[in-house]
Each structure stands twice: as C-alpha cells, then as structure tokens.
Amino acid sequence: MPSRLRPQQLEARVIELVDLVLAGGRIEDDLVECKGQWPDPRRRPSVRQLAGAANKARGEPILWIIGLDEGAQMLTEVRSVDVADWWPAISSHFDPPAPELEHHIVVPVGEGQAVTALRFLTDRSPYVILGGGEDGKLDREVPIRDGTRTRSARRDELLRLLIPAVAPPAAQLLSATLTVDYAPAKDDAPAHAPFLDTTSFQLHATIFFDQPAMSTGVVMLPKHLMHARIESTISRFRFPVWELHYSYPQDDARPAFGGTTDRTVVVNSPMHGVDRRHDGVVITGPGTLVVSFWERLDGELLSMLLGNAIQVHLSLGVAGLDRRIRLDAELDCLPGEPGKHRSQWQLNEPADDPWAETKE
C-alpha cells in the first residue's frame, strides 16, 4: 500500500519546501518537482514528464508544486486552471492506468500568495503513454526520468519496474515530548576547571509503523541512519543534527523472579511486528518504536524557546533505498513552574474523527 497523507500533513510539507526554496535552498528529493506554470496537457512533454517521474519513483508518491520556480527561487503568478478539466486531459494520454491523483490542494504560503500541490500515487507502475517518443510517432512508450530529462526506459529498467521494490512502511508519530533543562554555571567553580552555562535537550518519541508492502514484507531501518533535528519557530538559532537511539532486547534483560542473581530473562524479539536489533530495526508487521536523544549544548538557550512552539524533524533511513522516512511535528510549550530551569514541549495532535466521512 502506498503511503497516504492527510491534507494537513501535505500542506505542512509543502509550506516547508516553499520556505526552503525562497530562502535560497534546493529540494534534494527526486520525488518533488516545482513548476512555475501548469503543465499544458496538449503538449507531449508534459505527459512524458509525469509518466517518467511516476516510473522512476517505483511505487513512491510524487509531489508537484505549481507556482514555485526553484531555479529563480521565487513564487510565480500562474494562469487559472480547472483541475477537473486539466487532470482528465492529462490522464487520457495514458494507456490505462494513469498515476492516481491523491490530493489537489491550494496551499497559502503568504499574504495573498499560494501554490497548488498535486500528490500522485505511483504504485501501479509501469505507466505507458500513447503516442510516445520525442516526436510522438511511437504507438506506445514507457518513459522514465533520467536526471533532468525524460527518455524511453531500457530493458533492464523495465525489469526493475516489475521486480518488487523495497518500500518504506507508512509511519505516524503518536507522541513526542521534548524536555529542556538549563544548568547555570557555578560561582564557586575552581579556576582551572570552570563550569559553563549548559542547556540539555531530551526527546522521547513513539512512532507507529504500518504493515510493510506485501511485495517485500520486510523493511530494515539501520541504526546509523536515524537522526533528529529541532527548530524554534521564532529563533534563527541553528540546532545540530542529533543521532536517535532506542533500546533493544539486551537492554530489556531483567533479573529472574525479581532476584539479584546472574540469571536473567531476556524479552524475546517479536515474530511479527517491529524487531529491535543492535544494528537497526526490522519491520515485518505493524508495531511501535520508541526513539530518543539526549544532548547538551553550551550556553543558556532555554529563554529563547520559552512560550513558543518547537518543530521536531525525524529522519529514518531505509536499507536498500536512497530515500528516508521523514516525520515532522510541531510541539506545544507546556506551562512551567516560575523560577525553574526546565520546560517541556509536547505533541498535541487531535485524534482522527472516525465518523468524519459520514457527516454531511
């Protein structure tokens, strides 16, 4: 099953990408494409680009952001387009099926400014278009993206499209708590070993993983590719990237029968679910994983964070895949006790309404 997003999650992702481009950055993701204007469904290159990107994605969703020029690092004024007409015109050029247009939303990104986000699901590749080729003389073609250009797929690439690809399971952040402690320097510290102001950061987050794609059944998340980063919503202080940690069965060993002897009982790894190993996490079914970090920085950093939300970004690499599972969330600041050098931030995301789709 492809990883599906709620509209709010997609909107937050688009805003992050737009901010990155407008700040002078580059989108280092071949699943995302920025377009200054709506692709013209009457022009063959527009259809080939979509088919080529969908085939290159090998089952991963792709995102088009209309109204953002990545090269010029600016928003553009686009012509008015009715998606109800545009999408059938594009998809009619495919030898069915076409990629699935999962979401089409307008995302406000500033005062009177907006971009349009199109998210396509590509889990039914290979995608074939009618009248393919650069000159349109081919009866049918399987295009594929190659860097910045689109060309016909080679035989080995067609075989790869048919071989089950490793696909990361859909993941959801269930809970996250960030604790920040400030330790002021001690006045009576010896001159040869002075104590400096320090601020420590401790994060605990629980991630739920869905069932991996049935084509593979097993996904491995290497330990050395698990990282986290935090950002203040108002401060421009740049926090470093920190490594994420988790416990594994050896850490869960406990004395047998509550005694203090050398005999221990080790919690067995699950046969189906999330299996924690010393070198990574193996996912064979739905389950949860608790990750954390504890880091300390010099200086008093707590005061600039108090009272404001904090953005948390988690990145989990996938063995055999050059893409990552990325989870982003905003944590709200909890009321603290006056005079204390500690504050906490928590994820405060309302639960989905199971009756939402039945409401009129």
Image (tube, helix red, strand yellow):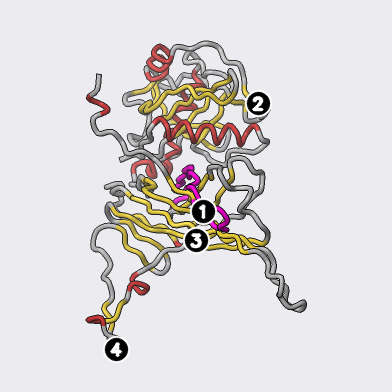
Does 340 appear in magenta?
A: yes
Q: Of discs 1 and 2, which sits in the foreground? A: 1
Amino acid type, callout 2 = Met
- On screen, residue 297 versus residue 169, left or right, reads right
Bounds of the magenta segment:
321-344
Residue position for label 3: 293
338 in magenta:
yes
Residue 279 versus residue 133 in the image, above or below: below
Q: Looking at the image, tell me whether mark 1 or mark 3 is earlier in sequence order.
A: 3
Residue ranking furthest to the front:
338
The residue sitting at 36% across, 35% down in the picture is 125
Q: How far from the left and from the top, in percent, is residue 256?
A: 25, 81
SS class of the residue under badge 1? loop
- Identify the residue position indicated by label 1 in the image: 337
> In the picture shown, does residue 286 fall above or below 257?
above
Residue under label 2: 74
**Direction from residue 92 to residue 229 in the image, left or right:** right
Distance between the alpha carbons at the discs numbered 2 and 4? 67 Å
Dots 4 and 1: beta carbons under 8 Å?
no
User: Which secondary structure lies at badge 3?
Assistant: strand
* In the displayed structure image, the side of residue 353 where residue 191 appears, left or right: right
Query: What's under tag 4, amino acid-wise?
Result: Thr
Question: Which residue carries the number 4 mark?
Answer: 261
For badge 3, the amino acid type reads: Phe
- Which-is-in-front pick, marks 2 and 4? 4
Label 2 vs 3, first from the N-terminus: 2
Nearest to the eye among marks 1 and 3: give it: 1
Tell me which numbered mark, 3 or 4, is placed earlier along the sequence: 4
Mark 4 or mark 1, earlier in chain: 4
What is the secondary structure assignment of the residue under circle 4? loop
